[in-house]
Image (cartoon, rainbow, N blue to C red):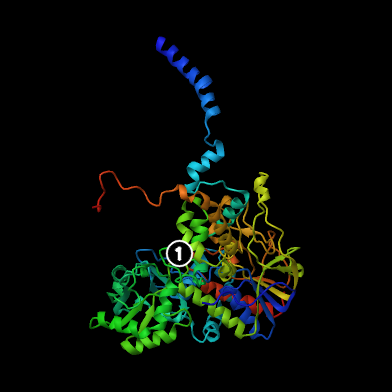
């Protein structure tokens, strides 16, 4: 019983004194700003209404690949970076977390070059608009990029293959 | 590769016959109407199932065939069609039973119109038996000649070519599958995994079919030399991946045959964006242009469900208005582009099924151009893969009460209900037949 009373008192102290004081004195950003500071670099940025509209349009892609056949940019960009127009609605439009991995491809593409693929799309995915929007979305991620390490740190004690 | 041909529909359109849809059925209808001397306009929203097809034109599967015995009792094509019509009274083959005497003539027109690139087996012969790139067996009566030449039932010693360094065509798997399926027909398949000059870079494994086809088209002699290095004695003919160029495959096949001294055929396609389907679509569009058919890119709709109030508008991809997401309401599309009048003496509906957009889902299945009733609602216990509109024996769409919807309106291809292509083995061959008949009926002037 005594230990429960002690625990309750400790919690009350934390809730009524320590925590409000820390919030008053803390210079760190709060709320959304703090969230963005912590997670923005991972691509977890706010999803705007325009983002939602584009995600709905990208969701119409059935991965038929017809647009890829008319994509003259396929082959001009390294296959490891870019595998055709359908990659935009299928993958990069769905996760802002993955978007920075597509940065090289998004900077190399010309959205207007997707007109021919857009015209033959059976489900009428707006490829040109999606390409433009992804570049704009990538630009929104840029301010947070420096918060992310370029690569995971090496395991302690040296991992396999290290010297 | 060439994309969608023709003009964007930003003006009124007029022709004797207007065909809505530009796949195989729509093309057949347009060609048939042009043969009758009519002016024809084809309006399509995009490419559809024809561009995604294997490149074969199937009419009916042997109803007693099973996956482990794809040849069944080895009935003729005509007998398979008859058996399907008997078992399924709402199938198009049953509805069009009185038109079957026209079948040989209409199928023959495919070869005439395409300079022999599309061919059909004799109706009294059995279906051809083709090996797909996944090792399955596909039976079909017709298709592109370079694909149909790969009939396993011809037996003999066959070399199956695959490319070392590219995962899409596994020669060993394919040879084993072919031997299992058609060994009884005297087939002896040998795997020929070959190393080629055009698959040397580390990221070449990711090349798409059309990229590989471009490389083969630029160096068919190099491919022939690589095959010759791997070719064992005794092989009588070759099966190659469906990559003999992005256009007409026949010149490349001829070059290979000349160099190797062996008949060559392509496998049908099975992957996404298959090249034979794309080639077929592009050949059809070129054919329509050459025949003087107006080609339009647009979306057609009728304001009163009849051809008399037909309109077209630009088929721009619909974008949703973002403000509706903010307001928490259901999103709605932006204002659609302006509509323009479409005038015709007869209209052929060839919009396809789910891929082509001829039948759409939602709260209930619907036909979006004329709002025709659709059969095949799974909630009503009907087969959704056979969904489509009902027609009479003259290919006129019917309302729920069985009455003809409107004079001068015809339907063809996959938008017609009652056919389940996967189960019935009746696909693009049936589309060609119904398309041609609909085009002839439309040219004759309607009802």
Q: The residue tagged with tag 1: helix, strand or loop?
A: loop
Q: Closest to the observer: B340 or B337?
A: B337
Q: Quadrant of residue B361?
A: bottom right
Q: Closest to the observer: B293 or B183?
A: B293
Q: Which residue is mark 1?
A: A82
Q: Quadrant of residue A126?
A: bottom right
Percent coordinates x, y for residue A24 in the rendering: 55, 27
Residue B177 falls left or right of residue B280 = left
Within 10 Å of disc 1 (Cα), the crowding (few <14, some 14-19, many 20+) is many
The reply to whether residue B305 is visible in this rendering is: yes
Answer above or below: position of B332 versus A108.
above
Q: Quadrant of the N terminus of chain A?
A: top left
Percent coordinates x, y for residue A82 in the rendering: 45, 64
The structure residue drawn at horizontal position 51% and vertical position 63%, both measured from the top left corner, is A107
Percent coordinates x, y for residue B178 in the rendering: 32, 71
Residue A39 falls left or right of residue B285 = left
Percent coordinates x, y for residue B72 in the rendering: 38, 68
């Amino acid at each position: 019983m005594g230990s429960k009373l002690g625990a309750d008192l400790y919690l009350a102290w934390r809730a009524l004194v320590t925590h409000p004081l820390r919030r008053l004195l803390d210079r760190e950003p709060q709320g959304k700003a703090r969230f963005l500071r912590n997670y923005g670099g991972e691509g977890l940025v706010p999803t705007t209404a325009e983002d939602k509209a584009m995600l709905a349009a990208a969701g119409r892609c059935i991965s038929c690949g017809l647009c890829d056949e008319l994509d003259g940019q396929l082959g001009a960009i390294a296959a490891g970076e870019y595998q055709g127009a359908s990659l935009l609605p299928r993958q990069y439009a769905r996760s802002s977390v993955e978007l920075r991995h597509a940065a090289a491809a998004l900077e190399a593409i010309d959205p207007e070059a997707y007109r021919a693929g857009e015209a033959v799309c059976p489900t009428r995915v707006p490829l040109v608009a999606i390409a433009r929007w992804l570049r704009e979305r990538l630009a929104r991620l840029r301010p947070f990029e420096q918060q992310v390490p370029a690569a995971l740190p090496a395991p302690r004690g040296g991992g396999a293959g290290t010297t | 590769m060439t994309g969608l041909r023709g003009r964007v529909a930003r003006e009124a359109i007029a022709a004797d016959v207007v065909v809505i849809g530009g796949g195989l059925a729509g093309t057949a209808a347009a060609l048939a109407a042009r043969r009758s001397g009519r002016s024809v306009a084809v309006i399509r929203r995009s490419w559809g199932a024809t561009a995604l097809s294997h490149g074969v034109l199937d009419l009916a599967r042997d109803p007693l065939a099973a996956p482990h015995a794809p040849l069944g009792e080895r009935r003729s094509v005509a007998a398979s069609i008859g058996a399907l019509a008997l078992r399924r009274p709402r199938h198009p083959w049953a509805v069009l039973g009185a038109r079957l005497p026209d079948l040989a003539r209409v199928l023959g027109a495919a070869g005439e119109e395409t300079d022999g690139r599309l061919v059909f087996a004799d109706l009294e012969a059995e279906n051809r038996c083709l090996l797909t790139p996944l090792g399955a067996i596909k039976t079909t009566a017709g298709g592109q000649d370079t694909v149909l030449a790969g009939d396993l039932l011809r037996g003999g010693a066959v070399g199956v070519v695959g490319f070392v360094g590219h995962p899409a065509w596994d020669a060993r798997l394919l040879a084993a599958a072919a031997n299992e399926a058609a060994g009884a027909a005297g087939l002896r398949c040998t795997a020929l995994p070959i190393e080629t000059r055009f698959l040397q870079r580390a990221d070449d494994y990711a090349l798409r079919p059309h990229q590989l086809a471009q490389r083969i088209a630029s160096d068919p002699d190099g491919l022939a030399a690589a095959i010759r290095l791997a070719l064992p004695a005794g092989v009588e003919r070759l099966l190659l991946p469906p990559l003999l160029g992005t256009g007409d495959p026949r010149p490349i096949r001829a070059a290979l045959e000349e160099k190797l001294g062996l008949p060559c055929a392509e496998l049908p396609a099975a992957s996404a964006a298959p090249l034979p389907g794309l080639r077929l679509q592009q050949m059809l569009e070129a054919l329509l242009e050459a025949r003087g058919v107006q080609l339009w890119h647009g979306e057609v709709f009728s304001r009163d469900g009849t051809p008399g109030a037909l309109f077209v508008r630009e088929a721009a991809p619909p974008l949703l208005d973002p403000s509706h997401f903010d307001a928490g309401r259901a999103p709605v599309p932006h204002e659609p582009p302006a509509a323009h009048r479409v005038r015709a003496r007869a209209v052929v509906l060839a919009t396809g099924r789910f891929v082509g957009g001829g039948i759409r889902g939602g709260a209930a299945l619907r036909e979006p151009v004329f709002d025709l009733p659709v059969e095949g609602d799974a909630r009503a216990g009907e087969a959704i893969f056979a969904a489509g509109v009902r027609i009479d024996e003259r290919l006129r769409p019917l309302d729920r009460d069985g009455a003809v919807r409107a004079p001068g309106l015809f339907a063809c291809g996959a938008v017609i209900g009652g056919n389940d292509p996967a189960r019935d083995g009746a696909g693009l061959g049936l589309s060609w037949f119904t398309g041609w008949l609909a085009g002839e009926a439309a040219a004759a002037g309607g009802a």
